[in-house]
Image: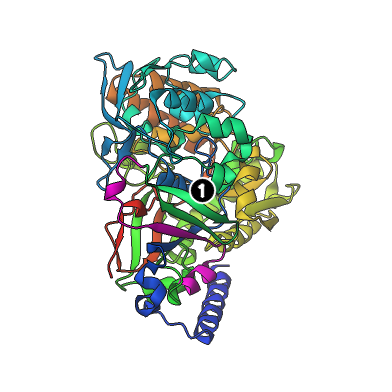
Amino acid sequence: MKRTLSLILAVIMVLSLFALSGCGKSNSSAAESTPAASGTAAEGKQLVAELGPNPETIDPALNSAVDGGNYILFAFDCLLNVDKDNKIIAGAAEKWEQSEDGLTWTFHLRKDLKWSDGSPLTAKDFVYSWKRVADPKTAAPYAETVLGMVKGYDEAAKGNVDSLGVSAPDDLTFVVSLAAPCPYFDKLAAFATLSPVNQATIEKNGDSWATKPESYICNGPFYIKEWVPSSYILFAKNPNYRDAASIKIDSMKMLLMEDANASFAAYNTGEAMMVKDVPTAEVANLKGKEDFHIDPDMGTYYISLNDSLSQFSDAKVRSAQSRAIDRDYVANTLMGGVYTPAYNFVGTGVADWDGISFMENANGGKRYISDDAAANLEEAKKLLSEAGYPDGKGFPVVNYSTNDAGYHKIVAQYVQQAWAQLGITVNVNVVEWASFTPQRRAGDYEVARNGWLYDYNDPSNMLDLLVSTNGNNDGKYKSADYDALMDKAAKEIDPKTRFGYLHQAEDLLMNDTACIPLAYYNDFYLQSTKITGSWHSPYGYWYFQYADIAQ
């Protein structure tokens, strides 16, 4: 099976290279010598980049994808921000403090804050925005994650939004009352979901406010000037931003592309100065070049099984499907060695209570899943037989959903063959990106590729995904024991005890195969050396708002 897939990959690589050479492209950075790559435009310095296709949404309350989050990062300014060293710094709030018991956080806003339309922004706007996230009518997928520790959240989540413990004693003061201390609450205050949104434009335009440039009122470094779906989003410098003088470029044009070959072509012809999506067949030729980057991310690429379906209700079935997959082959062959095999759910870079890696302390320092692919396959066959499906007999045909970007389809085809070894038939369904995530979140699928990049450095950000009430629990996993452990962790003050609960939670989900981790993320991309001052964060974001372009 591996030999067959390797041949398929080789053919894909040859065809890709042939097609690219036919267009007069090379593996060098052709963009460096083209007019577009100089960053000049009729209206000043313009940075052109590709971060993905049409986003599902760029409403801060509704977004749960990295590409949408990046656009929100360009357009909005949270209470606090994150710097290039991933440290929390002042944002719309110039200073903040917490009470000795950790239950009250007070944020002091800067004077004369404005929205992009020039109207004043006050602490009352944060009260409205946070209540909107908690409101069940909004259906914000992150609501419980970012506000579950705030006093009154449970009542707010039932519809009584005024019970949420947020207030504005005056225009420059925003106060948050917590039900229990949250050691990473400053990181939540810097998270895109809790961006302030303009009540007037939302009440006037309804759900469509975040789909049109004229109604997309924001408060960050850039505002949206033009938006042509499936083509580009044009961000222009916001003159009403609190620190507009520090923004060096005049506009950013984000190309909306679904196909990695198209984005690669845009880079090589100079249409784009940076592209996130690079064909995996090109990686080997690009490694070592100055404009090719492989940066570590904090996140895990995994498979969600829809646990609400009877065929995936037995943990033995789920475990068999997990064990049948050779993670080393997935990461180092199918993904070209730019990802790392995942044998735990919480991956690399995530700190434990004592400052060392959470993964090193997990499961007594041992992997949850062996790297012995042959032994794993035999165990998988045994488990499936014990579940009542010897050699896969009687098991329903599985529909595997994925979007067609980069390696996703190739991984899906590999899973198709890997599970065929168990006697399970798999059909691969390719879904357009803008439709893919809402279908998965709604549970309108059987099996789907999934992935999560951290929003802040705490293992709860990943482990919360499997809590039964979490809006991002795409697999619909339900375990009272798991929920209880995560609830204890959320309320625990002592760091060592709290992280102990989190380790127990990961033990439970891995033993129960609540999902199937495959690989740990890295971002690989092309970026012109003419772009200076920007940075890429381990949460998968590009901070182009602080960039400059060398002439």
Q: Residue at x 59, y 24 (%)?
A: 136
Provide the secondary structure element on which disc 1 rests: strand
Three-letter amino acid code of the residue under disc 1: Tyr
Image position, residue 530 (x, y; %)? 30, 68
Q: Residue at x 51, y 41 (%)?
A: 64
Say whether residue 257 is magenta.
yes
The residue lying toward the viewer, choosing from 167 and 165, is 167
**Outermost residue toward the front in this view:** 118
Q: Residue at x 68, y 53 (%)?
A: 424
How is the protein colored in the picture?
A: rainbow
Q: Quadrant of residue 317?
A: top right
Image position, residue 465 (x, y; %)? 50, 35
Q: Is residue 283 left or right of residue 98?
A: right
Looking at the rendering, the stretch of residues picked out in magenta corresponds to 241-266
- Which residue is tagged 1? 302
Indicate the quadrant containing the N terminus: top left, top right, bottom left or bottom right: bottom right
